[in-house]
């Protein structure tokens, strides 16, 4: 098979087009699924009475286990004073607490309280009951396909997260 100046064969270009088409179809299907589940997810978001910056901080803390004010500042892209105000409000609502960093007493680490963890869990898991009902409508064979696809997706997401932490970028 002949290669073009970039070293690709005509088959490579077709495979890339197929891959791009499949990715677009998966993204559209996922978008439709998100809309179908959206109303189940909205209740805990509205019940929590959180601003978007507060929600972002809670989600970051849930993913990372805790952060310093400077880490939150970098993540949010706002001033340290702004982060302090957001964290103060989260502390007042018993969603986060500040602790002295064991490695540096000058640094205060922000961590979720049990109530904060429960709030984040409710938001993340919203719609799980409906998702289980939807899955119950599927055959065992189809559930096996969904399980395998989900495992592949999680594996790719974990690899992407590891590459991001290592400073790599695929695109």
Image (cartoon, rainbow, N blue to C red):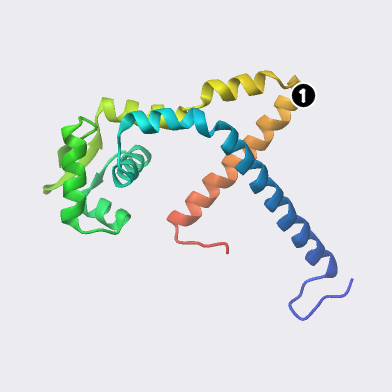
Q: Position of residue 128 (x, y in %)?
A: 52, 24
Q: How many marks?
A: 1
Q: Residues within 10 Å of mark 1 (few under 14, many from 20)?
A: few
- Residue at coordinates 50% horizontally, 61% vertically from top-left? 168
Q: Name the quadrant containing residue 93.
A: top left
- Left or right? Give the position of 153 relative to 11: left
- Residue at coordinates 48% horizontally, 50% vertically from top-left? 161
Q: Name the quadrant containing residue 50.
A: top left
Looking at the image, the residue that sits furthest to the right is 1
Q: Position of residue 165 (x, y in %)?
A: 43, 54
- Residue at coordinates 73% horizontally, 31% vertically from top-left? 145
Q: Position of residue 28 (x, y in %)?
A: 66, 47
Residue closer to the observer: 96 or 35? 35
- Left or right? Give the position of 93 relative to 14: left
Mark 1 secondary-structure assignment: helix
Q: Which residue is mark 1?
A: 141
Q: Is residue 28 above or below residue 170?
A: above
């Amino acid at each position: 098979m002949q290669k073009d100046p970039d070293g690709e064969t005509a088959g490579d270009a077709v495979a890339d087009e197929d891959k791009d088409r499949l990715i677009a179809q998966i993204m559209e299907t996922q978008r439709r699924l998100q809309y179908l589940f959206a109303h189940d997810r909205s209740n805990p978001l509205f019940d929590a009475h959180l601003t978007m910056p507060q929600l972002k901080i809670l989600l970051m803390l849930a993913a990372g286990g805790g952060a310093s004010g400077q880490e939150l500042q970098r993540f949010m892209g706002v001033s340290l004073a702004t982060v302090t105000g957001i964290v103060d409000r989260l502390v007042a609502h018993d969603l986060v607490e500040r602790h002295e960093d064991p490695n540096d007493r000058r640094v205060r680490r922000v961590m979720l309280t049990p109530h904060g963890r429960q709030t984040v869990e409710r938001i993340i898991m919203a719609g799980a009951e409906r998702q289980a009902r939807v899955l119950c409508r599927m055959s065992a064979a189809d559930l096996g396909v969904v399980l395998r696809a989900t495992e592949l997706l999680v594996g790719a997401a974990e690899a992407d997260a590891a590459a991001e932490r290592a400073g790599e970028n695929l695109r």
